[in-house]
Amino acid sequence: MSRVLVSIGAIQLLIMFVALVRAKVLSVLLGPAGFGVVSTIDQATQTAMQLAHLSLPFTALKFMSHRHSDGHEPFERTYASFFRVLLAVAVAAVLVLQGLLLWHPAVFGAELVAYRRYFALAFVGIPSLMLNVLLINTLAAAQRGAAGALTNLVIGMVAAVSAIVGVELGGFGGLYLTSVIASMLTTAGIVWYLRRSLHVHVTAPGVRLRDELRESPEIVSFSLYVYIAVGAYLVAVLITRFYVFAALGPAGAGWLQALLSIALTVGAVMTPMSGLYLAPMLNRQMPVAAKLGVANDFAAKIAPLFLLGGVAVSLFPGLALTLLFSPKFAGAASVLFVFVVWQCLHHLVNVYLQLLIGLDDVRFYALLNCVAYAGAALAFRPLIAAYGLGGAAAALSVASVVNAIGTALRLALRFHSRIETRVLVRGGASVAAIIGAGALSHWSAELSPSGFALRVAYLVAASLVLWMTTSEAERAWLRSWRIASAP
């Protein structure tokens, strides 16, 4: 596991760098207000795409992982079935969204009516966005997680270059026009790559969804429950953006996007690890104890990444916002650590939510997610009113805590399993260290001699705590990896 995760994580660092370059250039070219508009349109497009695809790409990952063990022909048949259905769903979604913009231009808020033509352009790219997720999951299901991560890197690089070129050539309109064209070309290229590398064809003969559903009728219920659960999270985050846009204006939305970007970047290494390694593993045919062992081992390994990355960002929030965006975003530095805490909780809890899916307890997973994010949605308004942008992260953190408690109880009562103590210790240490770093950033200036010295000492202390929580086997692996990588 360790070597696979290191490979995927290294590639994801490059993806993060590309995303940060895109955000940096766009924030400088457009300013906080323009960057807030673009981030809101992007989030609306992503949410519309993820709500419209009915969780079919993730459902495909689960069932292609099963079929991969049965041979090439069943795997190709499942791939082609989902590709065709997803393409039809994507086209239908674009038509519905364009109709909403035409007949109800204020559907995304009266403040955004002036930008509806850019929404319309962005929505044209939804089919490519949907299919790209399916294509990457196809590689993951074939146990080619590193290749999936590399493919994701190519997608990110093309998206970044096309967005920057588009802004330079034509502002908002140029950004979305060049992005859509580039995304379509990228999707076509990946389909060709899968045909060459995996020998799977989207035009495979004899593929019919009716036959696939007859063979696996659980596809419908599984897709529905995952769709409900993921939709609850997406809607909650989107509500946050629209509420902040309405309450604090485009500049406030730009600050929120900057905070989310950095926090999500800290957690971005874990996202492909979960999608390209953990999910395919948990959805293969394995005993409950074996799946629990995979989940515990995975969670124990990603917690230290948050301890180091989260502490480093939280110690220098103003510097991070200035370097990654511009000095105009540094005013949001005081609440950055709260967003980092939320991401730490979110990714650790998500490991065990993925375990529930792998154990086919999808109905409870969906119900728990809905309860957690319904509570977050209700908490947004009072928390944001009381604590500003930090209130949004606090509400999302509450949802993660609710998910954690519910998942732990479900594993104990139904599956007679529990989360390992080392995971709880490392997770708790990571959250405490990030909160401590955030508190330290309030007490002293980041770049003053004394403030810098305190931060370096704190980072060293956090690294020592991390080393103390590692097992002897993990220390031996780290030493062997260091020796192997030495010249």
Image (cartoon, grey):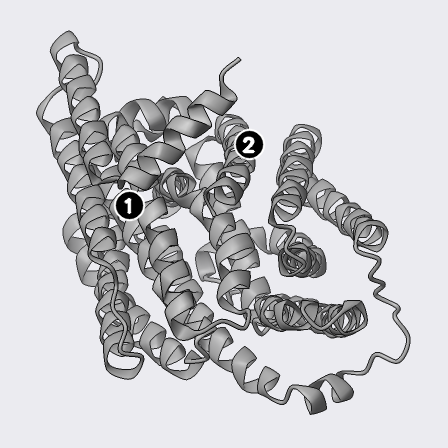
308 horizontally vs 117: left or right: left
Check residue 97 in the rendering and tell me which mark sits there, or answer none.
none
52 lies left or right of 457 = right
Q: Nearer the viewer, residue 129 or 76?
A: 76
Identify which residue, 224 or 199, lies in the foreground. 199
What residue is at 84 percent from the left and 55 percent from the top? 195
Residue 409 image offset from top left, x and y in percent:
22, 75
Secondary structure beneath dot 2 equals helix
On the picture, is 477 further left or further right than 281?
left
Location of residue 74 in the rendering, given as x and y in whole percent from the top left corner: 76, 74
- Identity, as a three-letter code, of the amino acid under mark 2: Leu
Amino acid type, label 1: Phe
Residue 167, visible in the rendered structure: yes
Residue lying farthest to the left in this orientation: 443
Where residue 135 sits in the image (x, y, percent)? 70, 57
Q: Which residue is mark 2?
A: 14
Label 1 environment density (alpha carbons within 10 Å; few <14, some 14–19, many ≥20): many
Residue visible at 58% across and 70% down in the picture: 62
> How many numbered callouts?
2
Q: Nearest the camera: 325 or 345?
A: 345
Give the mark toward the camera: 2 or 1. 2
Q: Which residue is mark 1?
A: 339
Instruction: Indicate whether 18 appears above or below 344.
Output: above
- First in sequence: mark 2 or mark 1? 2
Q: Residue at x 21, y 69 (%)?
A: 405
